[in-house]
Every structure is written in structure tokens, then in C-alpha cells.
Image (spheres, grey):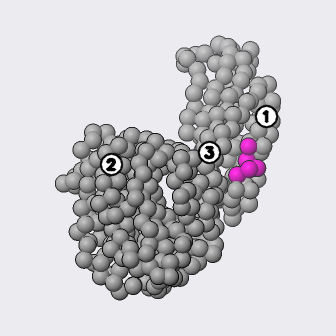
Amino acid sequence: MQEAIKKAVSDHDSLFTHLRREFHRIPEPAFEEHKTAALGAKYLRGWGYQVQEGIGRTGVVGLLEGQGAPASGRTIALRADMDALPMEEKTGLPFSSEHRGMMHACGHDSHLASVLGAAYVLAQFQRQLRGSVKILLQPSEEKPTGAGPMIKDGALENPRPDAITALHNWPDLPSGQLALRSGPVTGSVDRFEITIRGRGGHGARPHEAVDPVLIASHSVTALQALVSRCNDPIKPLVITIGQIQGGTAFNVIPDQVTLIGTVRAADPALQRTVPQQMEQLLNGVSAAFGGGAVLDYQWGIPSVNNDPAFTQQTKAGLQRWFSPEQVIELPEVSLVGEDFSLFLEEIPGTFFFLGTGSAEQGVGLHHPEYAVPESVLPVAVEAFCAAVLTFFGQE
């Protein structure tokens, strides 16, 4: 079937471009992807899929039951995220965003086009497929809070997939290159708030106060020691303070200061140790200056952890469809967050990357000028088809 699939992908290149442009024009925020979801559902129904809408609020599930003999009874899921970012687009593209202040700056329009493109191609071979294909169009990846509600609403049931895969466009890789690896490939995403408590006073008489601004300043610096001196340097870890709040006037020492930030780790075991380390450090720094600290640590999503067996099977299949040079081992883990990790906690799968080469022009994800080159869409579509047929043993 390989040559037949390749020909079908080549013959329908214009469809993938059309899909991408349609979705690019109508970017919508998390859990408000109503137009996007309706459009995706319409296409899936038209191609013969059984469709469910409103899964996880705005998610869509499509099912194509293979009829090939002998049928394996196995199911593989392909997932695409739908939401956009609250940004004003500056690409200058003729199909730029029609929704002011919203933009597909993370390339989710290309993810939709790739998965739906694969859904279309695979539907043309329904009678030959020896298993079923499930399409998941997920809301709210950017938050990231969309995968959980979809799972809760039964997206992975009736039938339950035996495997799942998804991709993300990646500016750091050459255009059209595919990269994947076993184990962790992204970071966990946790949020924390630290309340530093002191005793307010006059800015000219600091000796009569306990300055929480000073304590907060030392705490920000000290927290980085957890990364550089208390953590194995070959295990990725990031602690970032994104907000500092406190004070009402230039000459007043406030009673308290709040630090808000995120922790990212690739190793789940490392992720679990961080809150205790933070609490010990913060208590020590605060006590040294006569103050106190309260840590509110909020667990988020885990790292994306690719199943080794399925990942290696998929990688080998992709290298047979493309070439060993085009399909490589992902060179490094990225600590960006991805709630595809929640699907992987339920069933084995792999999350892989598609190069767009955009970083060479100094433009990357979440940039107002970022746009996925349309030349990579057929590669993504074929990669999804290859993953499906490799899983079914139908290459």
C-alpha cells in the first residue's frame, strides 16, 4: 500500500494547503474553538467517519472502521490540537487571521491540516485497512487543559485505541525533517505561588522592618541553585519566576511579596522532588532575614513520555517510507509543555516533531510572524499514514 498512499498524498497536495488556510483564517482561543471544531467535524463526516462533537467541551472524535481482511481489530488514534493564541498576526499572509487579536502562532492550523489530510487519505483505503483509525481534534492545548476533559468524556473509549500518535511543527529542525525518540521529549508543567512575609515599615528606616522585597530577591537567586547545584546536570530542569507582586509606594516597605512561576522537568521522579526542595530553601532564606515563606505548589501536567516499543516501531516504519537521513533521533528534550502526555498515561504512543526551518530566519513558535511552510504538509500527512500502516503491519 505504500506506493498507493504516496500517490494519494501527492495527488491531494492542494487539499492539505486548503485545509491549512481555512483553519489559519479562523483562530479561536481555548474551549472556544466552535468554528474550528464544526469545520473539522464536517470534513470527517463527509469522508465517511463516525463523528462525535462536544467531547471535552469543544473536542471532536472521528472513527473510521477498517474493513481489510483479515482485520486485526486494533485501533490507532491520531491527535491534533485546535486552539490558537491571543496575539495579533503580523505574517502578511493573504489568508491571515480574520479574528482580531487571535493567531495560529504555534502552528496548530498545520496540525489540523496534517491529521485531517491523513484522515482523508486513509478513508480512500478503508476497505484495505486492517484496523480502525480514530481522529481526536483536541481543544485547549495551550493552557494546557484540553486532553483531560476529552479523556473524561470518553474520547479513548468505544473503541479504546491500542496506540496513539501526534506531531508538533518544530522551527529548530530543517524543513521536512522528522524527529522522534523514546522516553521523555517535553517537560512537565507545574505552577507555584510563593508568599514572602515580612513586617512593613518606612523605606528610610529598614532596620525597623523585615523587608520581604529583599527576602524575595534572595529567594529568586537561591531557587536557581536548585537547578545548578542540587540537580543532576544531565536531567533537564527549569525554575522560572514569571511574576513578582508587592508594594504600594516607592518609600514603603510592604508586609509581603508574592512570587509566581513555573517548574519544568523531563524526569517524573525529579518533578516529584522539587516542591520539598523549594520549601526547604525558601524557609531557610526567609528565616535568615527574620521573615517567612509559604509555598503553594500546583501540580500540572506530566512530561510527554514516548512508549519505547511503539516509538521504535514507528521510527523504523518512517525510515522505510522516507529515509534514515530524513527521519532522525530527536537531538534534545524540550521543556515546553504538552498535554498529549495525558493520553500517553492511558495508552502507548509517540509524539514526534516535523521540522519547519523557521528558526533560521529568527522566527519561532509564538512569534507574530511565525507561519508553518506549506511545503511540509504532505510530509506530515504521509508520516501519519505511515505510522498507521506500520502499526497495522500493512506497509
Quarter assignment of residue 87: top left
For label 2, the SS is helix
| Residue placed most toward the observer, 48 or 377 | 48
Rendered position, 336 above or below 56:
below
Q: Residues within 10 Å of mark 3 (few under 14, many from 20)?
A: some
Q: Over which residues does the magenta segment extend?
A: 271-275
Q: CA distance from mark 3 to mark 2?
A: 29 Å
> Is any atom of residue 328 visible in this view?
no
In three-dimensional space, the C-alpha distance between marks 1 and 3, rounded to whole angstroms, equals 23 Å
Residue 245 vertical position relative to residue 238 in the rendered view, above or below: above
Residue pictured at 54% horizontal, 71% vertical: 74
Residue 283 numbered mark, or none: 1
Label 1 sits on a secondary structure element that is helix
Q: Residue at the spot x=58%, y=67% of the render?
A: 162
Distance of label 1 from label 2 (alpha carbons) = 51 Å
Which amino acid is tagged 1? Asn
Residue 216 image point, x, y percent: 67, 32
Question: Is there a contact, CB below 8 Å, between mark 3 and mark 2?
Answer: no
Give the label on residue 300, or none.
3
The disc labelled 3 sits on which kind of residue? Gly
Circle 1 crowding by C-alpha within 10 Å: few under 14, some 14–19, many from 20: some
> Which is nearer the N-term, disc 1 or disc 3?
1
Observer-nearest residue: 61 or 166?
Answer: 61
Mark 2 highlights which residue? 38
Q: Is residue 179 left or right of residue 270?
A: left
The image shows residue 89 at horizontal and vertical percentages of 29, 47
Residue 273 included in the magenta stretch of the image? yes
Q: Which image quadrant for residue 190?
A: top right
Q: How many numbered marks, from 0 up?
A: 3
Q: Was residue 100 drawn as part of the magenta stretch in this picture? A: no
Q: Nearer the viewer, mark 1 or mark 2?
A: 2
Q: Nearer the viewer, mark 3 or mark 2?
A: 2
